[in-house]
Image (cartoon, helix red, strand yellow):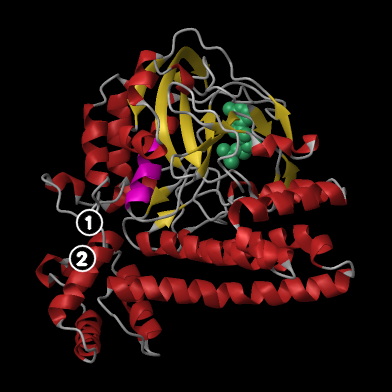
Amino acid sequence: MNSSVGLYQDHCGFCFDNSYSKLPASLFTHQVPQHFTNPNLVIFNERLAGDLGLDIDGLKAANWSFFSGRQLPEKSSPIAQAYAGHQFGHFARLGDGRAILLGEHITPNQARFDIQLKGSGPTQYSRSGDGLAALGPMLREYLISEAMYALGVPTARSLAVMLTGEIVYRAESLNGAVLTRVASSHIRVGTFQYAAAMDSPDVLKALADYTINRHFPELEKQPDPYIGLLKAVIDLQAKLIADWMRLGFIHGVMNTDNMSICGETIDYGPCAFINAYSPKKVFSSIDREGRYAFGNQPMIGEWNLTRFAESLLSLINSDQSEAIKIASQCLDRYQSKFRDDWLDAMRKKLGIFDAEPDDLILVEDLLMLMYKHQADYTNTFRNLNRPSQLSERLLSDQGFRHWMDKWNERLSRQAQSIGDAQALMDQHNPLVIPRNHLVEGVLEDASKGDMQSFHEFLNVLLMPYNQPKDDKFLSAPDTNYDKNYRTFCGT
Ligand code: AMP
Ligand code: MG
């Protein structure tokens, strides 16, 4: 996509284009954000704004009003995007019910990012919702998305949160807020499902061509760009879910509408990090059957990609049975791609540089022991090379001591020194993650107007591989905390 042609930079550094709204009109509706009466800035991501080439003084002089939707960047043509999705396995037509895409900002380096407001008022797709968001969930998304970015996971970013000055009504009355999100795009598996369900070959083709041009331009020259698109999205999702699994991240609501084509983590809702290792762990209050449990995520990724493949069938081949054959062959690559990415990440967590066939067993044996003893996922990996800091339960298990011997033998078989292995481990095992009890604590303070603890935690999360000054950021809560902890969609 040629980013620089004819673009105008306004006095705040916004350089807007609206390529998505040149797609067929059925894929979106024009929608301006709600005009909130008394917006107030809560947090602003100065570093991200700098990376985007925005003029921070200009934004401030404008009272941050772009981030509440009161003022629009020059050339912005705001829209709500239509999409569909399988929600907990059931197909539904959806769309941006509480989000508005202001347009695409082109950075000084010619990178293109969606700028989206979340919680900015109703749209044609709001159904019975109010289109609004409360402060807590928007700050939660800000904190966790920025933490994920610092942990090296592809993700939508957070640029600002503003209070709207108005109340939103949920189980209780809460302060309304708008989050400004920055993402490579918001094209979802569900966007393709929506286009495919319209039964209009032109719309589906326009969306696929646009996606290829925007995210995978190298495919344009290939003889089968749509097969290439399917393979590229499979690979990106496999990598993304391997990233989640290496860190103990549970997305919580992996519906196909929450799965980005460009392989970024989007739609932070009831997400959470595990403490004690368990593949069965679920925190989301709405996930009653554990469909999106921690250990199910790789398999759900494949299920979602199968829905993506289905939506592309008519583009892959005009003969449906041939198209299904080709799509199935593409999907076959998912499991091995995921396994390779995940094992690669887990090897690094264990200080292993090369590959041996039994590495998978070594990793799985450790996870079994962690599960048996409810060992803390983050701290166990971080402290494997500092055994005195491991949990008593783990250390007293003969099976674990045997595992340590096997692991040490494995490390001694590689060319790199033990010191190199330890350095590799420290680079790949974070000390600090957004632990649920800490997240809730800073959100509680923020709800009372005190942002100090939020900023303190955020600063620690931005350097997750460094020792924080305060040990409170390292400790897991007692196991009862997790038993009762529930996360919500934030609607
Ligand atoms: P989510 O589970 O957050 O991905 O949302 C699923 C669908 O519900 C999306 O289409 C959202 O836009 C929509 N939605 C969520 N919250 C609201 C709200 N407060 N008002 C209107 N639509 C909403
Ligand atoms: Mg969503």
Residue at image location 33% in from the left, 71% down from the top: 372
Q: Is residue 319 above or below residue 31?
A: below
Q: Is residue 396 visible?
A: no
206 with respect to 305 (left or right): right
Under mark 2, the amino acid is: Asp
Circles 1 and 2, Cβ within 8 Å, touching? The answer is: yes
Q: CA distance from mark 1 to mark 2?
A: 7 Å
**Residue 303's spot in the image, x, y percent?**
65, 63
Q: What residue does disc 1 label?
A: 465
- Which residue of the protein is positioned furthest toward the top in this rendering? 37
The local secondary structure at tag 1 comes to: loop
Within 10 angstroms of label 1, few (less than 14), some, or many (20 or more) residues? some
Residue at position x 48%, y 38% in the image: 182
Q: Where residue 237 appears, x then y in whole percent?
A: 55, 61
Residue at 44 percent across and 32 percent down: it is 137
Upstream in sequence: badge 1 or badge 2: 2
- Horizontal and vertical percent position of residue 333: 61, 76
| Residue 144 seen | yes
Question: Residue 165's image quarter?
Answer: top left
Other residues around mark 2 within 10 Å, as few (<14) / some (14–19) / many (≥20): many
Residue range corresponding to the magenta coloring: 142-150
Q: Which residue is mark 2?
A: 426
**Of the pair 346 and 202, the residue shown nearer to us:** 202
The numbered disc on residue 360 is: none
Report the amino acid beneath label 1.
Answer: Tyr
Q: Secondary structure at mark 2?
A: helix
